[in-house]
Amino acid sequence: MRRSVIIPVALHTFAAVATLLWLLWYFIPTGHVFKGLTTVLILLLAGWYLFKSCRREQSVSDAAVSAADLPLLDTQGPVVLVCGDRLDTLFQESPLRKTAQGWWLRADDVSRLTDVVRSIQTQFPRQVGQLSVMYHCLPDHHQDEAVLRSTLKTLRQQSKQIKSLTGFTLPVVVSAEFSGPETPWILVRGDKPIVCPANDSPQAFIDWQQADDNIVALPAISQAFSFIRNTLTDELEKPDRLTPPVRTFSVAMRLGTAPPETQSVWSHWLFSRTCLQFTQHSNRVNLFPDAVLPLLAPFSSTVQGGQRTRRLVLLMWLCALTALGISALNNRDLIRQVSTDLQRWNAIPMNHYRPKAESLAALKQDALLLERWQRQGEPLRYSLGYYPGQRLWLALQQAIDTWTPPPAPKPVPKIVRLDSMSLFDSGKSVLKPGSTKMLVNSLVGIKAKPGWLIVVSGHTDNTGSVQLNQTLSLQRAEAVRNWMRDTGDVPESCFAVQGYGDSRPIASNDTPDGRAHNRRVEISLVPQADACRLPGAKHASQDVRDVSTEEMEK
């Protein structure tokens, strides 16, 4: 028995844990640390639940097996658990009465209903869905209405416990037999009572009461209906904060079978309202209200799995719905992220090159991610909802294709500054004998090329007259030009010579150091169409390469 209890509990627990971990690791967008801690917590709770469930199921199984000696329930129809008053008169030889439309099973006292249902659930778990309850009431045998109502309240408590045990509410039938003129069973389901004679077909109550032989019983029948409505069903269906109301499935009633008692609840009720008293009753054998069984048949079916299986299926459904919802939220966040990047791209003007390039990098990152998902398959957390990857990728590619790179910057002339005092003697324009090495080292990057003009400009400090300084600066520039022309075999057309005197100082002339900086010769390359056309060279291109500015001084 213990092995048969542990295996289903373990299987259900394993399935529940697998479902929760599937939802956690594949759909919930959290970090790995949180997922790892949550996984450990789920496993610990599952182990604790498995341990507790096995101990509880073992104790319940042992108690349930000994609670009732159940016959084999192999019927497909409803199985009605009968509890209430004087059941020995109904079940005279056997606790089980079989019919073609269903079975009646004796449950004895109302307080034992839950134990009987638990026994059936343990031994015949599939038959739990076929169970119903009938409370058999004999008002003539009750001396106190409060005691009768207490029994009905116990029935409500048992119904609550049975629902907690099985997961659903069992239909409850109220069967009442009164002293009085003899009548067949009268069934009330809905608002149209029907009469069920023992050896005849059922007929409507309104047709049955028109017979002359039945008129005498009508006052007692009317009071019996009133007693059931105001005492039995009222106690079962009234609201209570501890026990929920029990909705009566149907009422079965008949008169003439219970021995009359003058001090009973029924005799007092009847006499106080009609002044009627009955002194004799029929000796007919007590019969079951078999006409109730066809009414219960649509609500009777075998259970596919027990309560634990139903809870597992419910958990799986909830996890599946949660996964669908999270997948939809993940797709919404993906759309929102890509849309935000596209909106930022469209909001930045194309001539704002730096922020536009940053936005372009974000678009390319999104596109690369979507391309990888297209090749490898989108993650599971996106796949259950509407995955918009292809549509988003196309929108990103269209935006990326509109990118226009910034235009190439205009070429900046390269300037080489030569210290005049290192090349010339003071006031002179003739190169010193030792200046050749410095010129070679300084002018390595200055090369004649088509489309570039070599500009040589001379500068002096403010010492001396303006005219002399102008002439001296021009002569020094010509001397450097002549050296470059003769040494490199560069045509005359590649040069432009300028003398600025002291008109363009780069430092203050008030200090010796500043005047030394101002005495200089500058050589620069300036793009100019048709400049420096070497013999046999083609026309210079208008596309001028960028030459970085480099200041060289000694």
Image: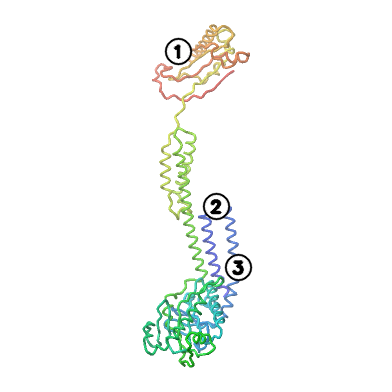
Mark sitting on residue 51: 3
Q: Amino acid at mark 2?
A: Thr
Q: Is residue 502 above or below residue 325?
A: above
Which tag, 3 or 1, sits closer to the chain's start? 3
Instruction: Give the total number of marks visible in the rendering.
Output: 3
Q: Position of residue 293 (x, y in %)?
A: 43, 80
Q: Dot 2, crowdedness within 10 Å: few (<14), some or many (≥20)?
A: few
Label 2 – label 3 distance at C-alpha? 30 Å
**Closer to the camera in the image, 511 or 215:** 215
For the residue labelled by badge 1, is the local secondary structure a helix, a strand or a loop?
A: helix
**Residue drawn where x is 54% and y is 52% of the image:** 30
For the residue labelled by badge 3, is the local secondary structure a helix, a strand or a loop?
A: helix
Q: Position of residue 379 (x, y in %)?
A: 48, 52
**Callout in the foreground (3, 1):** 3
Q: Which residue is mark 2?
A: 30
Q: Position of residue 173 (x, y in %)?
A: 47, 79
**Callout in the foreground (1, 2):** 2
Label 1 – label 2 distance at C-alpha? 75 Å
Left or right of residue 545: residue 38: right
Which tag, 1 or 2, sits closer to the chain's start? 2
**Closer to the camera in the image, 537 or 97:** 97
Q: Are marks 2 and 3 in contact (CB under 8 Å)?
A: no
Q: Which residue is mark 1?
A: 492
**Closer to the camera in the image, 380 or 168:** 168
Q: Position of residue 127 (x, y in %)?
A: 48, 76
Q: Is residue 474 above or below residue 355?
A: above
Left or right of residue 44: residue 320: left
Farthest-out residue, right: 512
Say which quadrant the C terminus sits in: top right
Label 3 – label 1 distance at C-alpha? 103 Å
Q: Is residue 20 above or below residue 478?
A: below
Q: Is residue 437 above or below residue 328?
A: above
